Amino acid sequence: MSGIDTTREQIALYAKSLFDRGLAHGSTGNISVRLPDGSLLVTPTGSTMGSLDPARISHLAASGEHLSGDKPTKEMPLHAAFYETRRDTGAVVHLHSCYSVALSLLPDLHPDNALPPLTAYGIMLLGKVRLLPFFVPGDPAMGDAVRGLAGQRSAVLLANHGPVVAGKDLATAVNAMEELEATAKLALLLRGAGAVALKTDQINRIVDRFDVDWT
């Protein structure tokens, strides 16, 4: 099996895992992976992450030319913006996961740091999560908004839409996405309960220990 075929299989495996555990539903969510030659493998538009056919996963040249597979997700501008602005990005995961979407609807989120600092791993795996405004799905302006961050965020939360996470590889991006969803769930469960978030000195110790970008 070639390297590209193996990666296609991995995308389908991770996608099914996310779907089976309720982090994706229907035909929502998309995944992309950058190959060593700079080309991209991308889940097709209208597909369900629960039953992807690896052979039909889209293959795009680094220039964006469609090489093989089905038509890619309409959220390609969003994915492309992360690859363009974060050179170490090897994969991007975008979901409409329930708790993250619910968190994005709350009126009092800090736009520069929408995810409350509740756990060490939320900080370690995600850094600060920027809240971006609502865009119609597929709107190229989403990509422009990510480019406007100049590579300073590996994760964003699209208002009324869902989270997007970039990682050095597929496993890293999926793990960080799961951490974002778990932290969003905690934030909603604890809302109004007077929960004690991590204090500034505790956050700084985590940031220093694990070299987290907290700007």
Image (cartoon, rainbow, N blue to C red):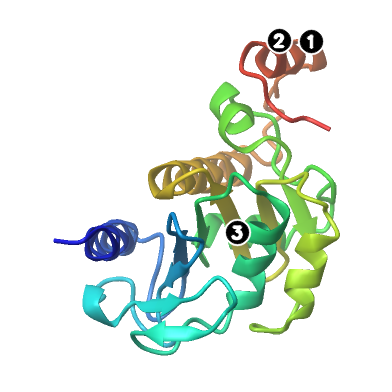
Residue on which disc 3 sits:
163
The numbered mark at residue 201 is 1
Question: N-terminal of the two: label 3 or label 2?
Answer: 3
Single out the mark in the foreground, 2 or 1: 2
- Secondary structure of the residue carrying numbered label 1: helix
Question: N-terminal of the two: label 1 or label 3?
Answer: 3
**From mark 2 to mark 1, how far is it between C-alphas?**
6 Å
Identified at 66% across, 75% down, the residue is 77
- Secondary structure of the residue carrying numbered label 3: strand
Residue 51 seen by the camera = no
- Tell me: residue 207, above or below residue 28: above
Q: Amino acid at mark 2?
A: Arg
Q: Nearer the viewer, residue 17 or 84?
A: 84
Q: Nearer the viewer, residue 146 or 62?
A: 62
Q: Determine contact: label 1, label 3, CB under 8 Å.
A: no
- Tell me: residue 141, above or below residue 108: below
- Secondary structure of the residue carrying numbered label 2: helix
Q: Is residue 210 left or right of residue 149?
A: left
Q: Nearer the viewer, residue 63 or 98?
A: 63
Residue on which disc 2 sits:
205
Q: Determine contact: label 2, label 1, CB under 8 Å.
A: yes
Please state the horizontal and vertical placement of residue 118, each as a whole percent of the image: 64, 28
Q: Amino acid at mark 3?
A: Pro
